[in-house]
């Protein structure tokens, strides 16, 4: 099943706009959340097919939210790609241990993001 509905979770309005614009222009339906808590509400109500998750946010961080998604039987099949300014290899490894499918360092390269989304289909 091809991915159509994507949830972007990022506390930066600029990042949300950049990713929303990129994905919308490529035919995806995009919703956004500004925090981990808002993301969990939207995931349960709208059941996206992919989540792009920031790490550093107020409240629950992206690692915590990814772990919550992965531990929820109803949500664990929804892939998460972490999009973070944290560029250390340890951050990438920790993200994967929390259940993320992939890890991209900001600024996100548009071609790389679209390729990674296509690979999940």
Image (cartoon, helix red, strand yellow):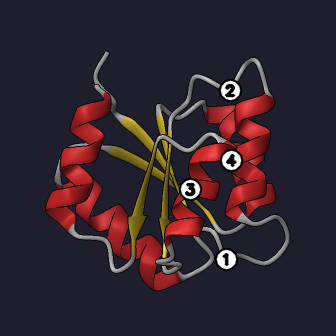
Disc 1 from disc 3: Cα separation: 16 Å
Q: Are marks 4 and 1 in contact (CB under 8 Å)?
A: no
Residue for badge 4: 66
Give x and y (percent) for residue 84. 50, 72
Disc 4 from disc 1: Cα separation: 12 Å
Residue for badge 1: 56
**Mark 4: secondary structure:** helix
Q: Are marks 2 and 3 in contact (CB under 8 Å)?
A: no
Q: Are marks 4 and 3 in contact (CB under 8 Å)?
A: no
Residue for badge 3: 93
Looking at the rendered image, the disc whose residue lies closer to the viewer, 2 or 1, is 1
Residue for badge 2: 75
Please determine whether, in this image, residue 62 is positioned above or below residue 97: below
**Mark 3: secondary structure:** helix
Which residue is at the front of the view, 87 or 109?
87
Looking at the rendered image, the disc whose residue lies closer to the viewer, 1 or 3, is 3
Looking at the rendered image, the disc whose residue lies closer to the viewer, 4 or 3, is 3
Question: Badge 3: how crowded within 10 Å, few (<14), some, or many (20+)?
Answer: few
Please determine whether, in this image, residue 19 is positioned above or below residue 112: below
Q: Earlier in the sequence, mark 2 or mark 1?
A: 1
């Amino acid at each position: 099943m091809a991915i159509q509905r994507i949830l972007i979770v990022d506390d930066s309005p600029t990042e949300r706009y950049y990713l929303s614009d990129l994905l919308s222009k490529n035919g995806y339906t995009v919703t956004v959340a500004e925090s981990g808590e808002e993301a969990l509400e939207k995931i349960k109500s709208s059941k996206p097919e992919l989540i792009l998750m920031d790490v550093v946010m107020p409240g629950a961080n992206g690692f915590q939210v990814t772990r919550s998604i992965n531990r929820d039987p109803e949500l664990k099949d929804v892939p998460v790609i972490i999009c973070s300014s944290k560029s250390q290899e340890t951050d990438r490894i920790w993200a994967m241990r929390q259940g993320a499918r992939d890890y991209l360092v900001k600024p996100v390269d548009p071609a790389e993001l679209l390729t990674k989304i296509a690979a999940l289909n």
